Image (cartoon, grey):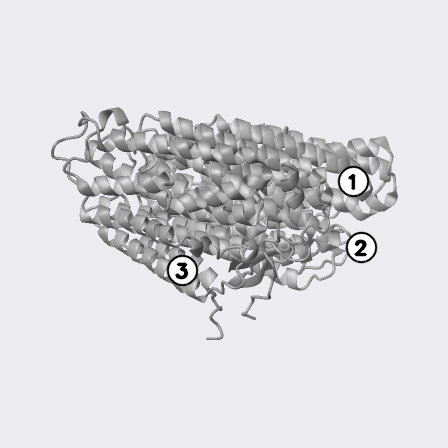
Amino acid sequence: MGFLPHIELATALVLIPLIGALGVLSWPDEPDGKGRISGGIALAVAVVEVGVWILTLKRFDFSAPQTIQLGQHHVWFKDLGVSYDVGFTAFGLWLVGLTAVVLTAAIAYAFWTGRTRANAYYALMLVLLGAIVGVFVAQDLLLFYAFFEAMLIPLYVLVGVWGGAGRLRATLKFVLYTMAGSLLMLVSILVFGIHNGSFSMYGPSLGATLPDHSTSSTLLFLGFMFAFAIKAPLVPFHGWLPDAYRESSPEVAAVLSGVVSKAAAYGFLYIAIHLFPGPADDLRTPILVLASIGLVYGSLLAFRAPDFRGVVAYSSLAQMGLITIGVFAQSGLGWSGATLQMVNHGLISAALFLLAGCVERRTGTGELSQLGGMARGRPVLATLTLTAGMIALAVPLSSSFAGEFLILAGVLNRGWGYSVVGAVAIVLAAMYVLRLISAVLHRDVGPAVKEDARDLGAWELGVVAALLGCLLALSVWPAAISEHTFGHDVVTDQPFSLITETPPTSAAP
Amino acid sequence: MIDTPSVDWFALAPELALLAASAVALLAAVLVPRRVRRTVAAIVCALGYAGAVVAGVLLYLHSEDAETVVAGGFSRDRLVASAAVLVGGIGIATVLLAARDRMRDDHVAEYYALLAAAGAGMIFFVGASNLMTLFLALEWFSICLYILCAIDGDQPGGLEAALKYLVMGSFGSAILLFGSALVYGVTGKLRFVEIAAAGHGHDPVLAVGLALIIVGLGFKASAAPFHMWTPDVYQGAPTSVTAFMSSATKVAALLLSLRVLREAFPSQAHLWTVAAAGLAVVSLAVGNLAALAQRDVKRLLAYSSISHAGFMFIAIAANNPSGARALLFYLLPYSAMSLGAFAVVAARERELGVPVTLDNLAGLGWERPFLGASLWLFLLGFAGFPLTGGFWGKIYVFSAAVERGWTWLVIVGVVATAVSLAYYLAVVRSLYMRPALEGRLAVAGGSPPSEPLLETAVAACVVVTVGTFFFVGPLADIARDATAFLF
């Protein structure tokens, strides 16, 4: 065993999909062009990923949720002080789970729908899975940046090759927006790391050299904020969102809104606030105001959107605003609520995008004016859409009700106005969700809805029901996440250190 | 009886290996039957470059202390040894890439002879340690390149490119020579270290001489605003020659710039760091903006190489040990990516028989998955994405600038990177996202020819591009040892 590198679970979760991608790529092209075998391999790899994540969940010690666990640390680039440093905190662990589940659902959806050039397609999906998991386990800023950038490569091709008619425009916008942000982040990372002598995201050297509340640390903070605000996106950086969410295939849109946006929220908390508590404190009010505007504005846009995906896309914009409010409440309650809501929203928006895909496959359009009356004779579609919609509008007892409640309670100390805005937004959410449900399921039968359009098949039911099952489980026990992420001192509203201690996790020589 | 200096033959071993290969290849032009002449010349040239690599490695291992040899005319240190390894590797890849070129048979042995001689000149250039050997080496490899550009008489534009290169290149050389004359006039010294020791720190004539030397080097490194020849020459020259020029010439010109500025003009650093930063900014701006408008892929890559000269001048402008390391490291993935990208263009060119544009590149990614994916990787590397050495190259260069306190230069570089994405991704769009132009272009020779040699070269470039990402740590250590003597 001596010559084999020691692999911890954090590394394994990154490597499994990447190795799977190589496997899929090396599989010979299948003549029928449907890619059943490569898709099957990819699906199996994704399921294994979920299994390994469950194993990680069992091994994770929740009595110290903010300690980096199950990771490893190797010096990579000594001259710059860069390390291959991975591991889990509870916060990252939940998001890795979300990633694995949503990507598995997306791959399963693609598997049963059939994709051209299947080998390349599934390999890219697996690379995307590995890269997103990497973002959530990286504990070194440059490693984080590498994974953050690496996400963009498969996404670019997945939208650009397998997307809809306007895909080229959508990809160009998407890439230029995100790169503009992440390159500014790179400047911040470099300046921060070189001042600190290390790019580690934790440790005693943090903030030792840069005085808090200084102009330079504020600028660095803004560099990070800009990148994450584009990726999330927050109003007014959402210009790429409608095109990207509409033109990509449904399962890629599900990944984009369900998981990739969470990488940004993760960055808000784990990098922007954690490394720059001073500037985060100084700029809290403008950020909270911006997020509140985004919440209301996104909800209104969702209410006016003419198509199924548009509603889901803008509701994502609104939800990211809400999550940002929770994050910048900078209290244990807000953070716990934000974490729960990140997982909730990831699952809901993935389910809704996949449902949108199912509807589009049957009718050839997502235009709400062309749809309607689909509930009749299609009980499975109606039930699933209704269930997803109910959770999305945060009916009491649902997991997103718990998440939104915690966020609003957490931000109360920062000003009751934010809570009022949040409460108003919940009403708006009810409006746009009910409008969507009535436009698709009820009213008169739309011109695009053919009499013979079938109900959801067993596989579509399976994929969406799995996502909704996770949500129902969380509705029963939201505390699984909200009370297992930031320790027991969540009830205080005092900011506390996000990573409490840094045990040496390296096991290999 | 003339006193001859003692010659450290070992220090000259890489050049000697290449010159021997060049001579044998020239002999092959007349002595070897036409049938096998191409093969023999190619193998001889490749062996010469392999010899240069081996000699370079040995020289690296046995030159812990930097010194000058051959009466102070040539340096024996790890920088020139690294250059020998780099240029040697580039040369081998170029031979693989050129081996199946549709070149006429009449000058094929001369082609390889000149290729070997050019490599020798470049390595000698990096090792130059006085103004005389510097100019000698500059002309040595430049003349070889002028002829190489024109060697394929069948290629439209080849002669024009060569003539342009000759005129502009000579202009650049003349400026450099004039600058050298001024420096000599002020200090009375030719050797770099003696110029530094002469101590005419505030002499304006010396400053003018320095400026002219920088201009001359800027011509060779194709840094804007001295880049005017680059797009035309890169476009018109045979693609294998372009591949060689874009990588090896950059290695030679930039490493020598670093050496001459650090060794001869340390007390004028306040002048030349600003000049280098200026060259960097202008190159980044001109290279990236002009590339946006290009349709011809070779031209596009030419502008991209101008912008990369800008990135590397950032490292020189940093004027600190990490800058020197960053420069040497950056050259390795950059050379691999540049060679590889031009190799894929060469493959497409042979397949179609016409210049490669963004339009007729369409569909390549699906038709030839390996070449397409490789080109994609090289472009991602140029843009500085992870999984390629280009990622660390850029970060290393930027961090050197941050260390110097020039964060503004990093911001310029970052903006340039963002702009560069627009055209790199335009190529990726052609590769994968546009329908192939079936029927509109006659594919020369039916189905794509299988080219194991070229694909080997591309595979090697892929390995280097990806390998430099994962093994950046040890490579940075090598670069540290190679440049430590400059500071």
Q: Using the numbered discs, state the Cα–Cα distance from disc 3 to disc 1 in whole angstroms.
A: 55 Å
Question: Residue at 18% of width from left, 45% of height from top?
Answer: A457
Judging depth in this view, the residue of B126 and A166 nearest the camera is: A166
| Mark identifier at residue B3 | 2
Residue A266 placement (x, y as % from top left)? 51, 47
| Mark identifier at residue B41 | none
For residue A428, side relative to residue B3 (left or right): left
Judging depth in this view, the residue of A436 and B178 nearest the camera is: A436
Residue under pointer 3:
A53
Foreground label between 2 and 3: 3
Please state which amino acid type lies under the numbered disc 3: Trp
* Chain of the residue under label 2: B
Please state which amino acid type lies under the numbered disc 1: Ala
Foreground label between 1 and 2: 1
Question: Residue at 72% of width from left, 58% of height from top?
Answer: B7
Residue under pointer 1:
B269
Which element type, helix, strand or loop, lies under badge 3? helix
Question: Residue at 49% of width from left, 62% of height from top?
Answer: A62
Judging depth in this view, the residue of A387 and B485 nearest the camera is: A387
Q: Using the numbered discs, state the Cα–Cα distance from disc 1 to disc 2 in whole angstroms.
A: 37 Å
Please state which amino acid type lies under the numbered disc 2: Asp
User: How many tags in the picture?
Assistant: 3
Res. B423 in view: no
